[in-house]
Image (cartoon, rainbow, N blue to C red):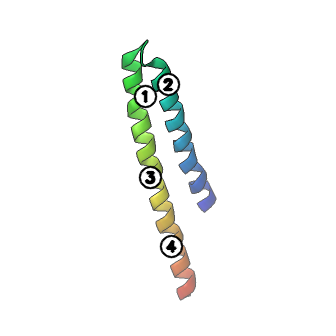
């Protein structure tokens, strides 16, 4: 289960990277679409940080439960 959480973290980084690419390519041609991808990049980076924090807490709780048992 923890491995799945780790892979989903990096999926958000990939989405953020793609969004940044689209921001740079669309900035001069379609500014509204670039703003749309700015939103996706910010949300993706935030979700990456949230998921990573959640996974680390989950791993710590699992280690603590195994040590106490």
- Spatial CA distance of label 2 from label 3 is 22 Å
The residue indicated by pointer 2 is 22
The residue indicated by pointer 1 is 37
Quadrant in the picture for the C terminus:
bottom right
Q: Decide which of tag 1 and tag 2 comes sooner along the chain.
A: 2
Q: Are marks 1 and 2 in contact (CB under 8 Å)?
A: yes
Q: Mark 2 Cα within 10 Å, few/some/many (few <14, many 20+)?
A: some
Q: Position of residue 24 (x, y in %)?
A: 47, 24
The residue indicated by pointer 4 is 60
- Spatial CA distance of label 1 from label 2 is 7 Å
Name which residue lies at 44% across and 52% down: 49
State whether residue 68 appears in this view: yes
Q: Position of residue 14 (x, y in %)?
A: 56, 39
State whether residue 1 appears in this view: no
Q: For this view, does 2 lie left or right of residue 23?
A: right
Q: Mark 3 Cα within 10 Å, few/some/many (few <14, many 20+)?
A: some
Mark on residue 49?
Answer: 3
Q: Is residue 65 above or below residue 51?
A: below
Name which residue lies at 41% across and 20% down: 33
């Amino acid at each position: 289960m923890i491995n799945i959480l780790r892979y989903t973290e990096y999926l958000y980084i990939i989405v953020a990277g793609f969004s940044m690419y689209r921001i740079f390519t669309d900035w001069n041609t379609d500014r509204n679409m670039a703003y749309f991808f700015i939103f996706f990049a910010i949300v993706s980076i935030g979700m990456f940080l949230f998921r990573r924090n959640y996974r680390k807490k989950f791993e710590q709780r699992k280690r603590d439960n195994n040590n106490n048992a």
